[in-house]
Image: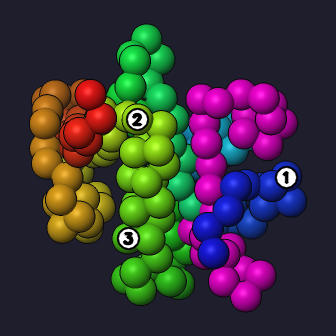
């Protein structure tokens, strides 16, 4: 089941993020910043967080929101699956939910930003396998030899 985040999910998600070796401490802090906004400022609509739950266990989540100053462009800020459940189709279900969310909102684009470093290769493969295309690349964005890669999927909601 995929549902909206609740305040009680926060600690589980923080532990999940900390257990994923790909994520740096800074990345976990940024993810938690968005989670904190979503659970404490319930009227905000910038960060829409949905958790994937099976048998009362949270196994992943995605955070999606409309890009500021656009009429219908959305960002997939985070998509995370518990390290013990990766490769079992949960990421695909979360990604499909994010696409459905954008489609319901009449979004034109869903954009995903990621890093070019080697430990993000599985992540990049995941986006490609799920029909997202590289639409932009900025060299040395995060740091020297760490490019920003932007994946996108265009919707027919014009």
Residue 121 in percent (x, y) is at: 22, 62
Q: What residue lies at 86% left-to-right and 59% top-to-bottom?
A: 8
Q: What residue lies at 50% left-to-right and 83% top-to-bottom?
A: 85
Residue 122 vs residue 100, the one in the foreground? 100
Rendered image quadrant of residue 37: top right
Q: Which mark is residue 113?
A: none
Residue 41 colored in magenta in the image: yes
Q: What residue lies at 85% left-to-right and 52% top-to-bottom?
A: 7
Mark before the other along the chain sequence, 3 or 1: 1
Q: Residues within 10 Å of mark 3 (few under 14, many from 20)?
A: some
Between marks 2 and 3, how big is the CA–CA gap? 21 Å
Rendered image quadrant of residue 158: top left
Q: Is residue 129 left or right of residue 16?
A: left
Q: Is residue 66 above or below residue 22?
A: above
Q: Which residue is mark 2?
A: 106
Q: Residues within 10 Å of mark 2 (few under 14, many from 20)?
A: some
Mark before the other along the chain sequence, 2 or 1: 1
Q: Which residue is mark 1?
A: 7
Q: Which mark is residue 92?
A: 3
Q: Is residue 152 left or right of residue 22?
A: left
Write the start and end of the magenta stretch as one range: 37-60
Residue 96 vs residue 11, the one in the foreground? 96
Q: How is the image coloured?
A: rainbow
SS state under label 3:
helix
Residue 57 in percent (x, y) is at: 72, 80
């Amino acid at each position: 089941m995929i549902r909206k985040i609740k305040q009680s999910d926060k600690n589980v998600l923080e532990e999940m993020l900390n257990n994923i070796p790909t994520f740096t401490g800074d990345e976990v802090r940024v993810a938690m910043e968005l989670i904190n906004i979503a659970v404490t400022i319930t009227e905000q609509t910038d960060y829409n967080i949905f958790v994937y739950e099976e048998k009362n266990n949270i196994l992943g989540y995605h955070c999606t929101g409309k890009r500021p100053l656009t009429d219908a462009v959305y960002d997939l800020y985070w998509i995370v699956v518990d390290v013990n459940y990766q490769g079992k189709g949960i990421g695909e279900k979360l990604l499909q939910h994010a696409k459905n969310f954008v489609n319901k909102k009449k979004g034109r684009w869903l954009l995903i930003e990621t890093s070019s470093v080697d430990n993000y290769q599985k992540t990049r493969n995941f986006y490609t396998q799920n029909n997202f295309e590289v639409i932009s690349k900025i060299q040395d964005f995060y740091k020297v030899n760490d490019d920003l890669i932007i994946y996108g999927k265009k919707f027919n909601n014009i």
